Image (cartoon, grey):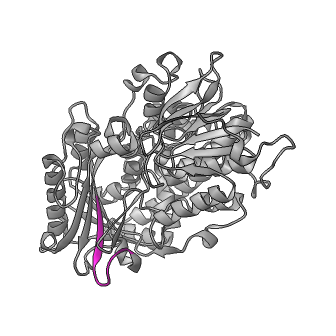
């Protein structure tokens, strides 16, 4: 039986472990922290429950496909509700917010009400987004790019000219061909932020994202995103994965013939351990894996490679328990500044600074889920995009973070209070926690303290993002948001499936057939308890 170690207990690590165990591997997963989830974490205080990371449930068919690989479904695993409105947008200097509805027809009518002719334009835009999305799922997202032969098929070849334009033209220029109103342009451009990028840096190929929120609608798993992590962890355990928490990997060990030998890790009591393996999969941050865990002479992506890459944004997270209801906000609310191009320039430019005011995001799951806050109270999660810069500092509880982070949080609270018409918001806060770029670096080993990973620019998308296996160490593979296909929970699930394809040398581009065959044990398989050699 193939002895496999998975580093990292976020969604990509858990999904990778589950898939490989289903394949017949003997899998041990090592997570450095006491809890699973990675960026999709959970924090609780005084009856409030906060998702500390992802909060948008998009691409539902990706989650459904993953569950069906194991003979179950999203409906069996999660209590999903559709949000309507999907989200609210508040614009600087505009007293009238815009609510994005749960279906395509309603949003076409909405765009028409804002700008005559924009409804028909949105209809065309979403047709293009839907076609591009379907093409991406069928031909690109589930590909390991191990071979380019599968792309030489009629449906790709006849679209080559169009695909070329979509790759080379930035998203903001593409959007400008459809709508004039700056508010509508911002609504269509904002999905670039989900990709850790900016509309002027993101290839217009990613206009496909608008298919997700403006046509498909936005879902939410009751209980929060920790229920998603719990469900995938349960699947992994049911497949036989051993999960060890408080196990910080300190090195990936390599044999003299440049094959992987295993890992070294430090347990919660500070004791060192060695764990042998035939395969090691790191779902940890790729920069950390390559520059800290792999010997310098065997790094596929050394520091000089990263010097030429662009990080996605950093973030200041603000978690607030607020007394009373906040009807001025929806489950998801976006706050857009008038000159948000300047905002993006401050975050991604050569000379960075913290935007003020900032285009920011507020999540209030208590609008949908009574389990996340005491009865009658509100749970707020604010995300303020900032440069990926650890020198901005770390957050803390009840104002104990670094001065810079707490000032950014104060400004965000004041901005939301003013724009949404909640003048007493700050006075009603009973629970407060902040998180800064230094926390992302310290807790998640995130490159430059970024909140998401490498930005989805042209040079950092698809096969240009990098490969999901080491070119210098046989048996070392990668998964997660910092490798292919990219950022976001659905992409992380796909990355786990691409990993399995890579190990199989499967160069197909479509999702695997459902369900996967039941776990296979060969006649020479060692018992699970003794499959690994420990020292």
Q: Position of residue 417 (x, y in %)?
A: 16, 68
Extreme-bottom residue of the structure: 376
Q: Nearer the viewer, residue 112 or 298?
A: 298
Q: Is residue 376 magenta?
A: yes
* Residue 493 versus residue 274 in the image, above or below: below
Q: What is the count of numbered marks?
A: 0
The image quarter containing residue 69 is: bottom right
Q: Is residue 437 visible?
A: yes
**Which span of residues is magenta-colored?**
372-382
Q: Residue furthest right?
A: 523
Q: Is residue 448 magenta?
A: no
Image position of 402 (left or right of 207): left
Left/right of residue 135 with respect to residue 343 in the rendered view: right
Q: Position of residue 291 (x, y in %)?
A: 43, 26
Question: Which quadrant would residue 113 be assigned to in this image?
Answer: bottom left
Residue 310 to residue 40: above or below: above
Q: Position of residue 294 (x, y in %)?
A: 50, 25
């Amino acid at each position: 039986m193939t002895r496999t170690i998975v580093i990292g207990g976020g969604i990509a690590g858990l999904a990778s472990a589950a898939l490989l165990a289903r394949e017949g591997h003997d899998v041990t997963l090592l997570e450095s922290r006491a809890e699973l989830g990675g960026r999709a974490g959970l924090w609780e205080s005084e009856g409030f429950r906060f998702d500390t990371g992802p909060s948008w449930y998009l691409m539902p068919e990706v989650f459904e496909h993953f569950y069906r690989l194991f003979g179950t479904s999203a409906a069996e695993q999660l209590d999903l509700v559709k949000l309507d409105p999907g989200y609210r947008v508040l614009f600087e200097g505009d007293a009238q917010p815009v609510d994005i509805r749960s279906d395509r027809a309603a949003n076409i009518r909405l765009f028409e009400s804002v700008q005559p002719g924009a409804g028909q334009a949105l209809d065309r835009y979403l047709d293009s987004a839907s076609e591009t999305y379907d093409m991406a799922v069928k031909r690109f997202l589930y590909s390991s790019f191990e071979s380019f032969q599968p792309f030489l098929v009629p449906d790709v070849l006849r679209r080559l000219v169009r695909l070329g334009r979509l790759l080379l033209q930035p998203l903001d220029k593409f959007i400008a061909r459809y709508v004039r109103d700056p508010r509508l342009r911002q609504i269509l451009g904002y999905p670039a932020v989900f990709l850790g990028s900016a509309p002027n840096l993101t290839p217009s190929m990613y206009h496909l994202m608008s298919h997700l929120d403006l046509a498909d609608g936005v879902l939410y798993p009751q209980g929060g995103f920790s229920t998603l992590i719990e469900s995938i962890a349960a699947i992994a355990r049911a497949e036989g994965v051993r999960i060890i928490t408080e196990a910080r990997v300190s090195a990936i060990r390599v044999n003299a013939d440049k094959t992987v030998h295993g890992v070294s890790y430090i347990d919660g009591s500070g004791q060192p351990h060695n764990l042998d393996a035939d395969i090691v999969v790191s779902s940890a941050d790729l920069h950390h894996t390559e520059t800290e865990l792999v010997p310098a002479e065997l790094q596929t992506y050394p520091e000089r490679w990263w010097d030429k890459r662009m990080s996605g944004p950093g973030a200041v997270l603000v978690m607030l328990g607020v007394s009373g209801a906040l009807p001025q906000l929806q489950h998801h609310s976006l706050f857009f500044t008038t000159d948000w191009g300047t905002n993006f320039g401050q975050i991604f430019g050569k000379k960075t600074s913290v935007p003020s005011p900032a285009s920011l995001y507020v999540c209030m799951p208590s609008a949908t889920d009574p389990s996340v806050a005491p009865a009658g109270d509100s749970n707020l999660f604010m995300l303020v995009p900032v440069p990926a810069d650890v020198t901005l500092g770390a957050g803390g509880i009840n104002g104990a973070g670094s001065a810079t982070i707490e000032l950014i949080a104060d400004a965000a609270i004041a901005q939301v209070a003013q724009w949404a018409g909640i003048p007493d918001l700050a006075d009603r806060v009973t629970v407060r926690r902040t998180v800064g770029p230094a926390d992302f670096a310290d807790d998640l080993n995130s490159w430059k303290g970024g909140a998401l990973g490498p930005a989805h620019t042209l040079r950092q998308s698809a096969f240009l993002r990098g490969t999901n296996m080491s070119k210098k160490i046989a048996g070392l593979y990668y998964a997660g948001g910092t490798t292919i296909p990219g950022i976001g929970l659905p992409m992380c699930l796909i990355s786990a499936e691409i990993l399995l394809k890579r190990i199989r040398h499967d160069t197909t581009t479509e999702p695997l057939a459902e369900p996967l065959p039941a776990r296979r044990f060969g006649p020479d398989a060692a018992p699970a308890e003794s499959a690994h050699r420990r020292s």
